[in-house]
Amino acid sequence: MYTIKEVAIKTGVSEHTVRYWAKSGFFPFIKRSESNVRLFEDSDLEWVKIVKCLRLVGMDSKSVKKYIDLCVIGDSTIKERFQIITDTRLKTQEKIKELTEQLSLLEYKENFYDNIIKYNLQDSWNPMNKSHDKV
């Protein structure tokens, strides 16, 4: 059995976040000790991992709770859960594509600035360095 602090260390999720998720009902099977401390089993860590994944890719808490509730209902919800995971994967792939494009631009600009610094050049992209014709 693991305390919230141990779960946080094992999963890389802050203690505060684990507590919040527990209060939100994301971990339907956690137990409490006699002194009312939440205790997680190894199987509960799997719940933490999927919640962490879903939250990191941008799923809102309400949708995570719906997914968890469907899991608890059981195998009769597999098709619906499959669709949720598929839709989430597709959205994540699109975000990755967008972020990859942004990363490429940042790498280009980083190289551009590196050359300006190395060769003591003026920033030709900065509009402040261009002469403006006055009307």
Image: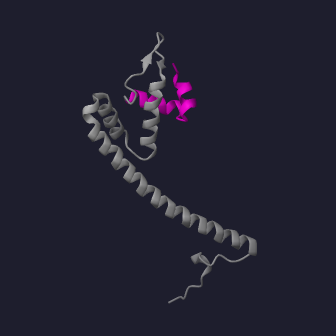
**Nearer the observer, 68 or 76:** 76
Residue at image location 51% in from the left, 60% down from the top: 100
Which quarter of the picture shows residue 109? Answer: bottom right
**Percent of width and height locating residue 124:** 62, 79
Total numbered circles: 0
Q: Toward the viewer: 45 or 64?
A: 45
Q: Is residue 66 above or below residue 134?
A: above
Q: In this image, 69 relative to 110: left or right?
A: left
The percent coordinates of residue 90 (x first, y second) are 37, 53
Q: Position of residue 57 (x, y in %)?
A: 44, 47
User: Depth check: 12 or 20 in front?
Assistant: 12
Question: Where does the magenta region start and end?
Answer: 1-24
* Prevailing secondary structure class for the magenta stretch in the rendered image: helix
Task: From the viewer's side, name the closer residue of 75 and 39.
Answer: 75
User: In the rendered view, would you say 86 is above or below 120?
Assistant: above
Residue placed at 59% from the left, 75% from the top? 126
User: What residue do we see at 57% from left, 77% from top?
Assistant: 127
Above or below 33: residue 126: below
Looking at the image, residue 121 sits to the left or right of residue 74; the answer is right
Residue 95 percent across, percent down from the top left:
43, 56
Question: Is 4 placed left or right of 50 in the picture?
Answer: right
Whether residue 28 is in magenta: the answer is no
